[in-house]
Image (cartoon, rainbow, N blue to C red):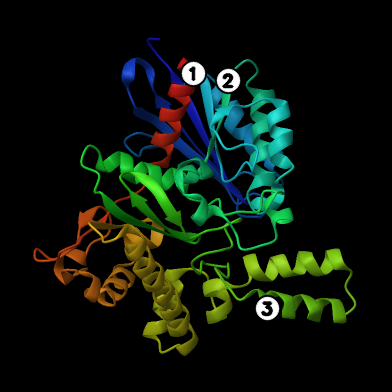
Amino acid sequence: MASLPVLVLNSGSSSIKFSVYEAGNGERTKLVEGAVDGIGTDLGKFWIKDANGKKLVDETPALPNRSVAFKLVSDALHSGTFPTPLAIGHRMVSGGPTVQDNQRITPELIDEMESYTAFAPLHTPIAVYIMREALSQFPGTPNFVILDTYFHRTMPEVAKHMPIPSEYAAMGVRRYGAHGISYESIVYQLEPKVPEKLIVAHLGNGASISAILHGQCLDTSMGLTPTGGIISGTRTGDIDPGVLIFILRKFVDAGMTAKEAADQLEIVASKKAGLLGVSELSNDMRDLRDAINAGNAKARLAVDKFNWTLVKWIGSFVAELGGLDMLVFTGGIGENDIAARGEICAALGALGIIVDPAKNNIRGEATISADHSPVTVRVIPPAEDLIIVNHVVRLLSE
């Protein structure tokens, strides 16, 4: 096919991000990208820019709901001003235990994935809504789901299996992981010289870490849902189950029904905890750094907790891998928080991780390890949209 414009859709709680790539004849060229931000707020924004960063659309429309927001995207891509997609790839955090492979989307598949909303409660409802809208507004265009969990399918059973009664394991309760498209993109960018023993830390408002052996996932921090693992912007990360039982009982004692108590517990664990919960200030690392500079002790504790948790996970993954060749930081915090990278690596000197402060004093892609460091430390931005396009092209040819 001479020309194959592929639309990539990545939906969030209050935004729809998208890009269009030319993928015909082996090309992978970004043509345009854009977003609808502030859905459901009074701060709506709709923008599209070309591959050189020039703004082609810059509007502040009313965005009362996702339907209005997605119609803006659909109308723009049907206008003739921008490339009309011939295939669409959707990022999906988890398809549950029965949808583990990237594949073409059908109405029945959407229903199946929606039945496992509890496995990614903050992400799945939005993603399946956008999938249905895309099937409706781009009739006849093949749509494909590209799963974050797909990269983690190579984990051994000992890593996947939860220490719970078998009746719950039979319901699909196990470790699935997240951020898999980001991890896959790091491996892709390192080819053909992918280190044998690699750890990638995807650090953003959602944070996770993966141990990668010979280019395949050996273990990852997030579990059944993205709430587990490392402390994140508003999520607990791994926590003593007794803490959650204690809070749940407090809700029940206050007169809530079982469902009300469970819903409130989910809000506490996923939206009020993490950096926000510890600092009582913000889930944004930039705000916390400013507060630390102003002497805020709770902000300092939140960031220290974040770093301490990462150091523990990295240490455990080095043990699993039997050593370490390279550590990669990615994601918003990983790419931009110079201090966090320095603080984390300073605690890992015993594992052969030595950062050069001068090399680390940069935002964006770089090698930041000292020349004499036994372990290479790099900063690599993810290329998730590119990976989604690659999977779409592969699936179209099958």
Q: For label 3, count other residues whose C-alpha is less than 10 Å away and answer few (under 14), some (14-19) or many (20+).
A: few
Name the residue carrying label 2: 142
Q: Amino acid at mark 1?
A: Leu
Question: What percent of the width, then of the height, locates residue 82?
Answer: 47, 24
**SS label for mark 3:** helix
Closer-to-camera residue (97/275): 97
Using the image, determine if residue 120 lies above or below residue 29.
below
Task: Classify residue 371 as left or right of residue 325.
Answer: left
Q: 131 left or right of 316?
A: right
Q: Which element carries disc 2, helix, strand or loop?
A: loop
- Amino acid type indicated by mark 2: Pro
Answer with left or right where residue 104 lies relative to residue 185: right
Specify the farthest residue to the top. 1
Which is more N-terminal, label 2 or label 1?
A: 2
Q: Is residue 286 left or right of residue 241?
A: left
Q: In front: mark 1 or mark 2?
A: 1
Residue positioned 33% across, 62% down in the render: 336
Q: Nearer the viewer, mark 2 or mark 3?
A: 3
Q: How far apart are the alpha carbons under marks 3 and 1?
A: 47 Å
Q: Is residue 379 visible?
A: yes
Say which label, 2 or 3, has the lower sequence index. Answer: 2
Mark pair 2, 3: CA separation: 46 Å
Secondary structure at badge 1 equals helix
Question: Residue 261 falls in which quadrant of the image?
Answer: bottom right
Q: Which mark is residue 242?
A: 3
Location of residue 144 (image quadrant): top right
Q: Residue at x 40, y 73 (%)?
A: 312
- Residue at x-position 49% and y-position 86%: 298
Is the residue under label 2 in contact with that under label 1 (CB below 8 Å)?
yes
